[in-house]
Amino acid sequence: MSALTSLTLKAALDGLADKSFSAVELTQAHVEAVEAARALNAYVLETPEQALAMARASDARRAAGDAGPLDGAPLGIKDLFCTKGVRSTAGSKILGDFQPTYESTITANLWRDGAVMLGKLNMDEFAMGSSNETSAWGPVVNPWRPNMGEGGGGNAKLTPGGSSGGSAAAVAAELCLGATATDTGGSIRQPAAFTGTVGVKPTYGRCSRWGVVAFASSLDQAGPMARTVEDAAILLTSMAGHDPKDSTSLAVETPDFAPFVGKSVKGLRIGVPKEYRVDNMPPEIDALWEQGIAWLKDAGCEIVEVSLPHTKYALPAYYIVAPAEASSNLARYDGMRYGLRVEGANLTDTYERSRAAGFGAEVKRRIMIGTYVLSAGYYDAYYLKALKVRRRIADDFDQAWRTVDALLTPTAPSAAFSLGDKADDPVAMYLNDIFTVTVNLAGLPGMSVPAGLDSAGLPLGLQLIGRALDEGTLFSLGGALEKAAGFRAKPQRWW
Amino acid sequence: MTIDAATVRKVARLARIAQPEETLEPLAKELSGILSWIEQLGEVDTDGVEPMTSAVHMPAPMREDVVTEGGEPEVVLSNAPKRAGDFFVVPKVVE
C-alpha cells in the first residue's frame, strides 16, 4: 500500500473521485505507515480507529454523491490544535491528559470538508522552539539523514526543525497527505525548509486562532504543510475563513487558492532584500538564493534589490513581544480547572509547584523574560520599545511594496542540524528564525518551497513573502519555483 | 543589563514558578545573556513612532451582549483536577 501514501494530496483526491481506491484503503495505508514510523516520534497520539471511522463515513458520503473538497484525505494535526475528545497537549506536561470539549475552528473546517484525522503531531512545548527538542514527548527525528561520505555522519539524527517538527517529518516521511501547523516566528517555514516540504504561513487573521493553544496571540497564525505547492493551496482554502469566535479573524472572502498555482508570474516584480545577506551564511544557501533569483527571472519576473533596514532588530524585538504575550497567555495554567496540579501548602504554593513541574526549561525561560519585560520599571524600556521597533519593521515592508509585488529570501540560515547541537545556547537557537520572524511581526504571508539539496544531501528552502492577503501571488510564485527547481528528492527510508 | 539572582527570585515569584535556590544563579546568567542581546534595540530611533499593538488594521468587532451558550457544568468540569458536585475544588484562599 506504500504507493497510496506516496501520492500527492491532489492525486489522492483525484483517485478517490474516480474510485481508483476508497477512503478506507487510503486511510489504512496511512495508518500502517504511521505505525511503522514510530522511530521518528512524529505522532504523539495515533487515532487509527477514529481515522477509519471517518474514512468509512467519507466513503458513504462519496457514494451518496455528497463528497466535500477534502473528502477522504488523511491528515495529521499538530498537537496545538484542540480536537474534541482527543487528547491535546501542546507538547507540554502541564496539559496532562487534557481532552478538549470543543473543536478548533481550523480542524472543524477540515472535517467539514471531509478530511480524516490520523492523529496528533509532536511539536516544541507550546510551540516554543526551533528544533522540536523542547517537547515533553521528546524530539522528532528528521526523516532526512546526511549522506555517508568523507567522515561518515550518515547516521546522525537531525532535527526536523520546529516548532512544527512533527508536522514536517510526517509530511516528508509520507505519514499523512498534509498537516496542520502553526507559525509564530518561523515554526511552519523553517521545518518545511529542513524537511523538503512546502509550508505556508498565511496573513495574520486569515486562519482562525480559536481552539489553537495560544503562544503569542499577535503573532500566532496557523497554516498548512504539504508535499507540493498545490497541495498546500488546497489545504489553506479549507482551513481559512472568517470566524466570529476570533476577534482578530479577518472578515474577508477566502479565494480558491489552487488555481493560482501554475498561473504565469510574468511581469511580477520580485524584491531581494539586501539586509538578508547576513554574515556567516553558508555559501550553499547563498548560491541557492541566486539560483532562485535566476529561476524567477527566467519565468519573466523582474528582480529588484530592496532594503529592509530594520531586519537585524526583528529577532530581539520578537524576543520581547513573544515572551511578553506568552507570559500573559500561559498564566492560565494554574492547576485549578484543568491540567497538572501539584498540591502545595497554600494557593500560591500550589500555583508555583504546579507550574514548576508542568513547564519545561525553555517555556519557563520565556515566561520569565516576558514577566521581566512587563514588570514595573521595565515596561517602557523593553516592551514599549519593542512595539515601536515592530512598527518600524512593518513600515520597511510597506515601503518595499511600493516597488515590488513579493520578496524572495532563503528560509533558514542553515540546513537541518544535529539534535543536541544548539540545545545549550538559547540565542544560537533563536537565530534560526532570522529570515522568517520579520513576517510574523508585520503580519504578512510567507511560504517556504523546497528548492535543492546541499552537499550533504539535505534539503534547503527558499522563502517567498507577500503583501497582506496576497497569498494568491505567493502560490503562483511558489508554483513557478517548484517547477523550475524540479525538487523530487525524498528521504531514504531507514525507520 | 545584568540580572542577579535576587531579581530572578522576584521574577519567578511574579510568574508563579517555583525555582529552587540553586537554579537562580545559572538562570540569572542565561537571562542576562538573552537580555544583553536584546539591548541592541536601543540603537533604533523610535522617537514619535506609534507602538504596533496589533497585526491587523481593523477596529475590534462588537457583538450583541447576549448569552450564546452555557449551562453545561459537566463539559466545563470534565478536565478538573479536583471537583465536588458542580464545583472546582481549589486550595483554601480565605482563612
Image (cartoon, rainbow, N blue to C red):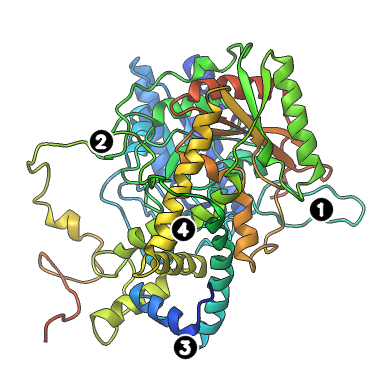
Q: Position of residue A90 (x, y in %)?
A: 42, 56
The residue where tag 2 is placed is B59
Q: Which residue is mark 3?
A: B21
Q: CA distance from mark 1 to mark 2?
A: 54 Å
Q: Determine the secondary structure under disc 2.
A: loop
- Disc 1 to disc 2: CB gap under 8 Å: no
Q: Are marks 4 and 3 in contact (CB under 8 Å)?
A: no
The residue at which mark 4 appears reads as A320
Task: Classify residue A245 by image quadrant.
Answer: top left
Marks 1/3 same chain: no
**Distance (Cα) linking label 1 and label 4:** 39 Å
Q: Which residue matches tag 1?
A: A154
Q: Mark 1, residues whose alpha carbon is within 10 Å: few (<14), some, or many (≥20)? A: some
- The tag earlier along the polypeptide, 1 or 4, is 1
Q: Is residue A323 above or below residue A459?
A: below
Q: Are marks 3 and 2 in contact (CB under 8 Å)?
A: no
Where does the N terminus of chain A fall, quadrant-wise?
Answer: top right
Query: Which amino acid type is shown beneath numbered disc 1?
Result: Gly
Residue A416, position in %: x, y?
Answer: 70, 49
In front of the other: label 1 or label 4?
A: 4
Query: SS of the residue at dot 4?
Result: helix
- Answer yes or no: are tags 2 and 4 on the same subunit: no
Asked which secondary structure carries label 1, the reply is: loop
Q: Quadrant of residue A209?
A: top left
User: Amino acid type of disc 4?
Assistant: Ile
Q: Nearer the viewer, residue A333 or A438?
A: A438
Q: Residues within 10 Å of mark 3 (few under 14, many from 20)?
A: few
Tags 2 and 4 touching, CB below 8 Å: no
Cα separation between marks 2 and 4: 25 Å
Q: Position of residue A161 (x, y in %)?
A: 61, 50
- Left/right placement of residue A431 relative to residue A134 reads right
